[in-house]
Image (spheres, rainbow, N blue to C red):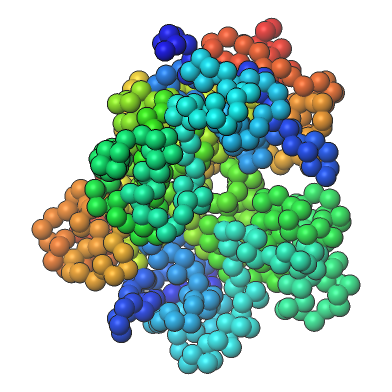
Amino acid sequence: MPPLAEPILEVRDLAVHFATPHGTLRAVDGVSLSLRRGETLGLVGESGCGKSTLGRAILRLVEPTAGSIRLAGTDVTGLGRAALRPLRRIAQMVFQDPFASLDPRWTIGRLLAEPLVIHGIGDRAGRAARVRDLLDRVGLPADAAARYPHELSGGQRQRVGIARALALDPRLIVLDEAVSALDVSVQAQVLNLLDDLQASLGLAYLFISHDLAVVDHVADRIAVMLGGRLVETGPRARITARPLHPYTQDLLDAVPGRRARLRDDGEGEAVPGGCPFAHRCPQASARCRAEVPMLRPVGGEVSLACHHVALAAAA
Amino acid sequence: MDPVLDVDGLFVSFPGHGRTLLPAVEDLGFAVRPGETLAIVGESGCGKSATALALLGLLPRHAVASARRLRIAGTDLAEADPQACREIWRRHRGGRIAMIFQEPLTSLNPVLTIGEQVAEAVRAHEAVSWRAARGRAFDLLRRVRIPQAEQRLDAYPHQLSGGMRQRVVIAMALACRPAVLVADEPTTALDVTVQARVLDLIAEIQEETRTALVLITHDLGVVADRADRVLVMYAGRAVESRAASALFAAPAHPYTRALLAARPRPGWTGARPRLPEIPGRVPGLGERGAAGCPFAPRCAAVLPACRIGRPDLIVLDGGTAACLRAGEFAAQETPRAAFG
């Protein structure tokens, strides 16, 4: 067992590059972050910013190109399939639609028992008891085990997705847009459930979402991602009350219900080798287009990757 | 000004087991004036999408729909026989009333270029040459602020981002300056910053063309930002129908109040607040029709009388609400003074 002070997840300079017909796509381009036991890190950004790829790379569902991932103190970056298996018990994932990749002809009970079978945990009776326990934990009736996915509502399905992630007693759950498709009242139920599970099981969450209002509710810390990089990280209250990066400000202004009118977005695409926000930023200078700003601490536990605001903060 | 869309007593049902009919929309009424935005808001299964499809005559064939009044740009379809209705809709769709769906890819043909599709939308309603239609398509793409519109005319849908695709769909919907635009979750599949810009764009065009907008959404934040009037639906019925300012200042129906409260509240301090849940779930199509208010089983403010008869619409500040206690709630301060 690693000492408690050690983070459950530590990512250093992680990069995931994909080869495409149009050249290399730098989906994740040098991201470092850490997550402590019982903590929630909200990872927010627009589609295509690399947040889902980052989440998958942490679980080694896609191969990192460079950098390192440590789970509970063990470097998992270069581990092969077999060596990785015990670490799969530490970190699990919940997707927006947990059933997209599951067999619709399986009962809920069989879907929940499958991770236990794969990891050789328990006998038949023990696994059945564990399935009942998991259903109870996520607020589903025991008879749900005999049902099929199509018989469940969206909220019930996501509860099953969470139960499946819990089956192996993980310490970290990566939640990728896990409540994004749910109705408001159901979303409230699932967010409360996640809160309860964290309190009782000491889980760490990497909560990936495009919805800053939801992230503001669940997160202890927030990391804002754009163009494969983190552009601002810090304590939740600081980020949402006093965003420093112009992109974070944009994201906050865009939260529905604020009546903010956004300025028109610039045309064109991000300049390689420059700030990922330069082509959309009202404050962009020649330096922003020529030099990628590095993520640097600017005080108050906030880190920021911006040439201009960093200068202002230092001045 | 007279409403350009005027609906009264709209019913939509779907066949269930045997010969039963399951009610998806019951006795719905609303009106929208030129340039006005009506938001229809509610959760899955409330009947908002069935309502949208009914307005455009796009319900599946097995659906059964009827209305006391369904007046679109001066023509009352409720008075026409079904055959005539289909003909009126066929002529109206695109021209008088147009629709934008949630997922732009469902409205775009993957094997035709953007230019061909927008030009086709123009030619469907106007007798112009392909060349002229392509010119119009270029203007429309610029109108919806698609960068490099010239090159994008020859692009295929998969080559555009989600936000750009939805702009193309908006361009097609606007090609014939419809009097009424029905947008069913038009920005739900888009990023928040893109969503805000697409909604800004719709608002801007609406101001210019005086198009009446029926905005169907689950997002109360979007409603607060964009709507003039709000219709809250629950289990196929209107539970509250009011001016947006009145509704957000003092929601009168317990369901509206519960929905507003269940949204994550920004800027909390101290211990993470628990989100107020609405116990239970929306009744399925086959579980409706019991006496009493459909929300009574889940309502925190329920009275014995609520379970006996359907609550009448009560007239209040800025509209109506179907709740015995609506007057009492409408007089209270909102549980969330500043929404958003």
Residue projecting furthest to the left: B304
From the top left corner, tell me how far across and down residue B335 is, in percent.
Answer: 31, 39
Rendered image quadrant of residue B230:
bottom left
- The residue furthest right is B131
Residue B37 at least partly seen: no
The residue lying at 40 percent from left, 52 percent from top is: A154
Q: Position of residue A164 (x, y in %)?
A: 39, 41
Report the label total.
0
Nearer to us in this view, A127 or A259: A127
Give above or below for A205 relative to B188: above
In the image: residue B217, left or right of residue A264 = left
Q: Is residue B161 above or below residue B265?
A: below
Q: Which quadrant of the structure image shows residue A23?
A: top right
Work out whether residue A27 or residue A286 is closer to the camera in this orientation and state it: A27
In the image, residue A169 sits, relative to residue B170, either above or below, namely above
Q: Residue at x 39, y 32 (%)?
A: A168
Q: Is residue A125 something that shows in the picture?
A: yes
Does B188 sit left or right of A171 as displayed? right
Q: Estimate the x, y position of residue B78 in percent, counting from the top left.
A: 45, 85
Quadrant where the image shows the C terminus of chain B: top left
Q: Nearer the viewer, residue A222 or B310?
A: A222
Quadrant for residue B234, please give it: bottom left
Seen in the picture, residue B45 relative to B20 is either above or below; the reply is above
Q: Position of residue A132 (x, y in %)?
A: 26, 43
Q: Residue at 57% across / 28% down in the picture? A: A58
Q: Residue at x 31, y 31 (%)?
A: A196
